[in-house]
Image (cartoon, rainbow, N blue to C red):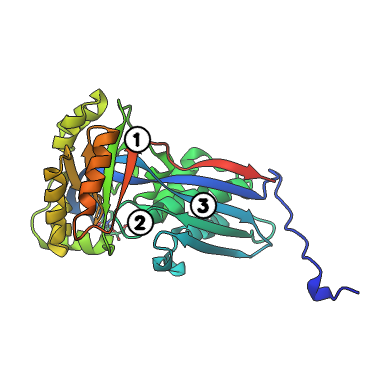
Amino acid sequence: MVPSAMTPAEPPTPYAGGLTRVRVRVPAKINLALCVGPLGEDGYHRLGTVFHAVSLFDEVIATLAHPGDVRVTVKGEGAHLVDDATNLALRAARLLEVRYEFDEDPGVHLEVRKQIPVGGGMAGGSADGAAALLACSMLWDLDTSPDDLLDLASELGSDVPFALMGGSAIGRGRGTELVPMITRGTYHWVLAIAEEGLSTPVVFQRFDDLGAPGNTTIPPEVMEALTTGDVPGLGKGLRNDLQAAAIDLRPELGEVLESGMSAGALGGVVSGSGPTVAFLAGSESAAMDLSRALLEHRFIRETRRAVGPVPGARPYNCGS
Ligand code: C5P
């Protein structure tokens, strides 16, 4: 007789949609312009930004689990640095759980496969939150419209709505009010990834400490270059008001920027709150040369090549 402890457990019962597994791929972002205005009463700075999704992806695989069994495992790039308490994929599942009505507490096992650096200024955690929102809403067969998802995303964090949307988009407010853009061309990026991440609130705080806030006007050169496909023009126009604060906290980033420019980049900018530096190259082969040159630099642990724009969080392999 087989002891009862060895009897395989009954699989969880799928919802009406019939899915038991949803896999979502979600991109990293860089900010082609990040214009930072004053700190608002809500504790966030007003922004004018141009988000741009690039082909460095995390994946979230959501598998249906028994009622009440909600957990996450993280694998890949910097997985050991992700803390369960702050994990946005887990927080996304919990947010849906409280916002929607369920007969029984829902269950899900989330597996996050990371390629986007943790604490790198490329919205990796936000990407995981966006992917988990989408995956769980499909798995649990929730009646979420795209607008509902964007609203829930903005509760999770300032960069989460853009991770759902992808492409290139203007961001206003604290970064959550988005207008998608039609752009021309494909842009080749080399991302210089630092040894250690930077904390976004610490960089914003340093920005405040360094003096007067700038304004939220997005440089017209950036808009024009993106909409006409002018790669050198975009290189020249890249702007990040947080860059000085990130360099103040990590002086070596100034040296990294200089070495990318002297190695032939058309432009370079700290990505978001850093410390990843994004360099624009004129072609795929120029990006390969630039990537090799940057790896010689003592402060660069790793480089990744990526193209943009790419779509936001998308389900691509779902099963019953
Ligand atoms: O929205 P999110 O949780 O990603 O923001 C992290 C932190 O970054 C905020 O607590 C705030 O300190 C800072 N931030 C800001 N202004 C923004 C976005 C983020 O000051 N527009």
Of residues 13 and 228, the one drawn nearer to the viewer in this rendering: 228
Left or right of 152 on screen, residue 175: left
Q: Circle 1 sits in a helix, a strand or a loop, which is it?
A: loop
Q: Position of residue 187 (x, y in %)?
A: 29, 34
Kind of residue at badge 2? Pro
Q: Residues within 10 Å of mark 1 (few under 14, many from 20)?
A: many
Q: Circle 2 sits in a helix, a strand or a loop, which is it?
A: loop
Label 3 C-beta lies within 8 Å of the nearest ligand 1 atom: no
Residue that mark 2 sits on: 117
Q: Position of residue 84 (x, y in %)?
A: 46, 68
Rendered-image quadrant of the N terminus: bottom right
Left or right of 196 on screen, residue 220: left
Quadrant location of ligand 1? bottom left
Q: Residues within 10 Å of mark 2 (few under 14, many from 20)?
A: many
Kind of residue at badge 1? Pro
Q: CA distance from mark 3 to mark 1?
A: 20 Å
Residue that mark 1 sits on: 309
Give the quadrant of residue 198: bottom left
Label 1 C-beta lies within 8 Å of the nearest ligand 1 atom: no
Of residues 62 and 213, the one drawn nearer to the viewer in this rendering: 62
Q: CA distance from mark 3 to mark 2?
A: 15 Å
Q: CA distance from mark 2 to mark 1?
A: 19 Å
Q: Residues within 10 Å of mark 3 (few under 14, many from 20)?
A: many
The structure residue drawn at horizontal position 56% and vertical position 47%, both measured from the top left corner, is 23
Residue that mark 3 sits on: 60
Does label 3 or label 1 sit earlier along the sequence?
3
